[in-house]
Image (cartoon, rainbow, N blue to C red):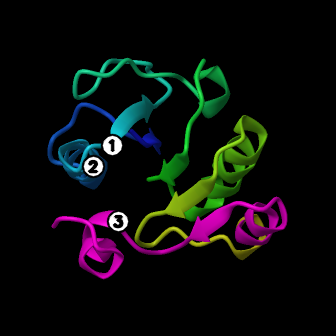
Amino acid sequence: MPTWAVVGLTGDPTRAAYGVAAWLQQQGKRIVPVNPQGVEVLGESAYRQVADIPFPVDVVDVFRRSEFAGVHADEAIAAGATAVWFQLGVVDEAAAERVQAAGLAMVMDTCPKIEAPRLGWAA
């Protein structure tokens, strides 16, 4: 089961991160909330930062403003993730270059739920 760290995920069901994380769970992915409060979300324990997650993470999915995205990209590289996904409106070209130079897949300024049909995932 692929593991997605969802940075910026809180328990607020009106936020995009919550809806996308719930959808990822429905698609068979394990989600790991990453937020400063460290509160449980969608039945999963949360961590304050990616580095605090005590098990491997496949994708780091970032729901933070662009000026903060690079920090999370660097955390993904350090954690040994295989991919970084910056959500709609999240753009940091320098971070994307670092991610790709480290050999990770990089997706920027889009959403996995939107891309699902093109990727062959259930929608």
| Picture disc at residue 29 | 1
Q: Residue at x 33, y 43 (%)?
A: 29
Kind of residue sitting beneath label 3: Pro
| Picture disc at residue 112 | 3
- The answer to whether the residues at label 1 and label 2 have Cβ atoms under 8 Å apart is yes
Place of residue 100 in the rendered image (x, y in percent of width and height, measured from the top left) = 76, 68
Q: From which residue to which does the magenta span run?
A: 96-123
Magenta segment: does it hold 115? yes
- The answer to whether the residues at label 2 and label 3 have Cβ atoms under 8 Å apart is yes
Q: Within 10 Å of the Cα at label 1, are there few (<14), some (14-19), or many (20+) other Cα atoms?
A: some
Upstream in the sequence, badge 3 or badge 1? Answer: 1
* Pointer 2 residue: 24
Q: Within 10 Å of the Cα at label 2, are there few (<14), some (14-19), or many (20+) other Cα atoms?
A: some
40 left or right of 46 in image: left
Q: Residue at x 35, y 65 (%)?
A: 112
Q: Residue at x 78, y 39 (%)?
A: 78
| Residue 76 in which image quadrant | top right
